[in-house]
Image (cartoon, rainbow, N blue to C red):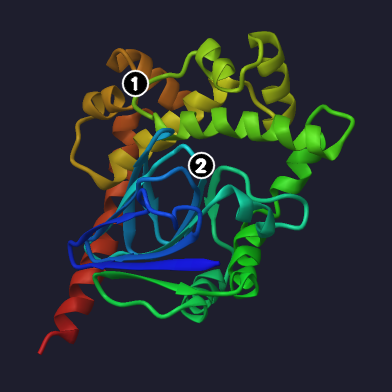
Amino acid sequence: MQLHTIWSDRGGMHAAGGTGPGDDDATLVVASRGASVAVVHAAASAWLVLRGSAALACREGRFNLARGQWIVLERDARPLLQAGTDGLVVGIALPARLQSLAAADGGLFTGLGQMAPGARGDALRAWRRCAPFARNAGRRQEVARLQLEPLLRLLAVQQAGFRELVERCPGRSLRRRRQVFARMQRAWMHMAGNLDRPMRIPELAGLGSVSVWYFTKTFQALYGEGPQAASSRLRLAHAARLLRGTRLSVSEAGAACGFENNCSFSRAFRARFGVPPSRYRVAVAPHAANRTGTRRQAASASAP
């Protein structure tokens, strides 16, 4: 098989895939320091943020990824990833015939999570072992599937927690339970990728091609909360991040997270965090200022 490698650096823009005979081959990607990579063919993809941050837009929505986070997307997602100015992101795009190699029980699931301790260094070493990279260039070379297996196993380890969730899904066979879990994860990812609006249950059920009744019952049994509660929790967590890390007003933060008015936002925020959003911002402001001051002092000390 052939392996396509891409290293996009310092604001570069590269595309993974195309319309040639090698479109079914795997593609390894590195994006760093403000560079972008777009997956333009139908392939499942996985991304790990090793340093800094990254923004990713895809069919499921928009995701702001921090250091140590990973995300796996379905084959029709066609993501566009941009590394932050201090970012380093590694990724892989897999054709359907290679996805089953990623795990002993049948491959990777779409999802979002935090890498296990020590996994960032392991990931970078695994990418480097697979093939050499040329800065701001792409190349193809012949590789054996065995060269990709350590990398795929590392990705599968990040999803080890999904096995218990799969067992909770209805179905007599493992294959059926995996299918159900994949459908529920598709809905969950759309909630996580659209934090600017509440998601309607019929819309989420339609993503998995199941009835509203079946979707609601299965989602509750699988994740321990209903879809509306999960959507509200994700949006409120995003609002808390905006209050901590931006200068948006309370009403602007609420509107950015899909709340119709400031009253409903404040009421939901207080029920979730125990304090209204205005008091929450005041409480976290000294800690944020201390972290900023520490970084500035460190930068001043290291400057020539």
Quadrant of residue 103 within the rendered picture: bottom right
The C terminus: image quadrant: bottom left
The N terminus: image quadrant: bottom right
The correct choice, above or below, for 248 with respect to 290 in the image is above
In the image shown, does 99 or 113 lie closer to the viewer? 99
Cα separation between marks 2 and 1: 28 Å
Q: Is residue 230 left or right of residue 81?
A: right
**Residue 289 is at least partly visible in this image:** yes
User: Disc 2 designates what residue?
Assistant: 75
The correct choice, above or below, for 146 with respect to 162 in the image is below
Residue at figure coordinates x 50%, y 14% from the top left: 203
Q: Are marks 2 and 1 in contact (CB under 8 Å)?
A: no
Within 10 Å of disc 2 (Cα), the crowding (few <14, some 14-19, many 20+) is some
Label annotation for residue 258: 1
Residue at figure coordinates x 30%, y 45% from the top left: 244
In the image shown, does 181 or 245 lie closer to the viewer? 181
Which one is earlier in the sequence, the residue at label 2 or at label 1?
2
